[in-house]
């Protein structure tokens, strides 16, 4: 019997939508990576492995040992029989990690940062609540607010005056402010001290997603709250473990009652298989490296690369500056070069690729229209020579790339 073929009109519907994305230079495609190294060609400046810990022998060994002890998977959801001593140990470690910023915190381990944001926002954002969310927040926060029953107010990026007025006018009994600590497409840090002040004034929770700060910022890499020296029981702090930590998963640290409520009400926690215990073992090993003196050395190396890139591209006589391409004022590993139009961003990414360098072009809707960019991401796993290679390739592209129509499609 011939196979049942897909209905033509269903396929045509998808084809038309993909074609529209193609026409706007917005089509996304997968790339298969065959190696774990950042510097086998093409030389990659797009990994979130900011400290190179994905390859750290102690982290990899902890994963192997964890799998041998607990098996490959957890076998069930946390509330059934999947919650192992490995998860519990990680939660204790993360609660202690966050304690200087959230006194008396408890922690909850989840399978991903995406699931963690969904969990917090849907469980706390009930119909008695209003969620105030920065317009540049990560997609997982946006999705969490959309699924929550709460009223949602998206405030202009980092605009605390605007937010203050809306908080003052808010009449729901529960208020929740949510923000990325480090904005993922800009690398800039949220005005967390002001946000905390507003949260205090208006009796709100302050949810902080530190996906890009943990491991990188603060004493011992403890993250953005520690970096800014902030401390409050109203913080609900989300650390994700797929980036600088080099593994996968996430923990929420918060007041013990918040954690108890998440265990009871957060559907992305309850109705999913617990993450493999071996991952929790590897995350614990990685957090130990991050907080140790070798972790300090990795952060120093990363900061040296940031300084090298910024100093070179700030040179007004350079070819990159002459094109009007500008780095976002970021002090973190994320160093986006804003070029304007989608077409320019794509052409520049291709020009770099032709020189053996991989930096993705980021376009709307991920970033605002007219601010298409190369999202350059530096890592302690890079060498000084490799950053130099990136700079040379950028200069070459800036000199040779034809002027493209500045139509911001
Ligand atoms: C990557 C990211 C997430 C998602 O974390 P995963 O663990 O990869 O699911 C959430 N928030 C921000 C700001 C991120 O950059």
Image (tube, rainbow, N blue to C red):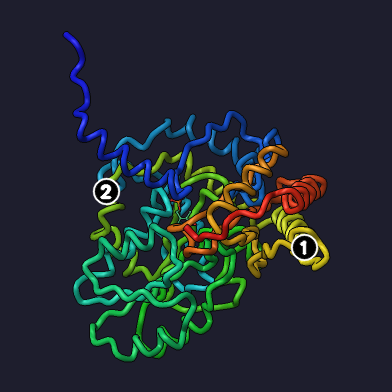
The residue under the point 69% across, 37% down is: 354
Residue 383 can be seen, yes or no: no
What is the number of callouts on the image? 2
- Name the foreground residue: 362 vs 22: 22
Q: Give the numbered dot on residue 395.
A: none
Badge 1 marks a residue whose secondary structure is: helix
- Name the foreground residue: 383 vs 297: 383
Vertical placement of residue 47 versus 199, above or below: above
Label 1, ligand 1: CB separation under 8 Å: no
Assess disc 1: are there few (<14), some (14-19) or many (≥20) residues with their C-alpha within 10 Å of its C-alpha: few
Q: Position of residue 161 (x, y in %)?
A: 45, 88
Which quarter of the figure has residue 144?
Answer: bottom left
Q: Is residue 37 left or right of residue 407?
A: right
Vertical placement of residue 257 versus 175, above or below: above
- Of tags 1 and 2, the one toward the viewer is 1
Assess disc 2: are there few (<14), some (14-19) or many (≥20) residues with their C-alpha within 10 Å of its C-alpha: some
Q: Which residue is mark 1?
A: 307
- For the residues labelled 1 and 2, the Cα–Cα distance comes to 47 Å
Q: Which residue is mark 2?
A: 79
Which quarter of the figure has residue 185?
Answer: bottom right
Q: Is residue 371 left or right of residue 331?
A: left
Of callouts 1 and 2, which one flags the residue occurring earlier in the amino acid sequence? 2
Vertical placement of residue 60 versus 268, above or below: above
Label 2, ligand 1: CB separation under 8 Å: no
Badge 2 marks a residue whose secondary structure is: helix
Image quarter hosting the N terminus: top left
Q: Position of residue 62 (x, y in %)?
A: 56, 38
| Residue positioned most to the top | 1
The residue under the point 57% across, 56% down is: 405
Residue 368 can be seen, yes or no: yes
Q: Position of residue 392 (x, y in %)?
A: 79, 49
Q: Is residue 317 left or right of residue 270?
A: right
């Amino acid at each position: 019997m011939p196979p049942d073929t897909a209905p033509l009109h269903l396929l045509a519907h998808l084809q038309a939508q993909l074609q529209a994305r193609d026409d706007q230079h917005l089509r996304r495609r997968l790339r298969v990576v065959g190696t774990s190294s950042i510097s086998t060609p093409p030389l990659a400046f797009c990994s979130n492995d900011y400290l190179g810990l994905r390859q750290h022998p102690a982290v990899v060994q902890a994963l192997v040992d964890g799998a041998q002890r607990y098996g490959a998977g957890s076998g069930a959801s946390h509330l059934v029989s999947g919650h192992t001593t490995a998860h519990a140990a990680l939660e204790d470690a993360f609660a202690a990690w966050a304690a200087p910023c959230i006194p008396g915190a408890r922690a909850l381990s989840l399978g991903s940062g995406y699931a963690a944001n969904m969990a917090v926002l849907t469980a706390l954002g009930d119909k008695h609540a209003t969620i105030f969310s920065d317009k540049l927040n990560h997609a997982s926060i946006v999705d969490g607010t959309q699924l929550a029953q709460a009223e949602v107010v998206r405030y202009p990026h980092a605009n605390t005056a605007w937010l203050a007025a809306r908080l003052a006018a808010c009449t729901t009994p529960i208020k929740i402010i949510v923000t990325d600590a480090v904005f993922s497409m800009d690398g800039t840090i949220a005005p967390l001290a002001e946000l905390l002040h507003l949260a205090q004034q208006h009796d709100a929770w302050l949810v902080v997603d530190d996906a890009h700060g943990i491991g990188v910022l603060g004493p011992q890499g403890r993250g953005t709250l520690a970096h800014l020296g902030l401390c409050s029981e109203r913080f609900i702090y989300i650390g994700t473990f797929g980036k600088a930590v080099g593994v996968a998963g996430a923990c929420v640290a918060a007041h013990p009652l918040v954690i108890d409520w998440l265990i009871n009400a957060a559907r992305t926690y309850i109705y999913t298989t617990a993450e493999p215990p071996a991952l929790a073992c590897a995350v614990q090993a990685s957090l130990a490296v991050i907080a140790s003196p070798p972790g300090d050395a990795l952060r120093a190396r990363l900061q040296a690369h940031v300084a090298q890139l910024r100093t070179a591209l700030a040179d007004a006589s350079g070819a990159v500056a002459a094109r009007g391409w500008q780095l976002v004022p970021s002090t973190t590993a994320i160093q986006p070069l804003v070029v304007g139009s989608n077409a320019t961003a794509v052409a520049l990414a291709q020009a770099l690729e032709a020189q053996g360098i991989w930096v993705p072009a980021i376009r709307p809707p991920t970033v605002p229209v007219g601010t298409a960019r190369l999202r350059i991401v530096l890592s302690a796993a890079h060498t000084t020579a490799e950053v130099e290679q990136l700079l040379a390739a950028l200069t070459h592209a800036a000199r040779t790339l034809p002027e493209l129509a500045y139509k911001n499609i």
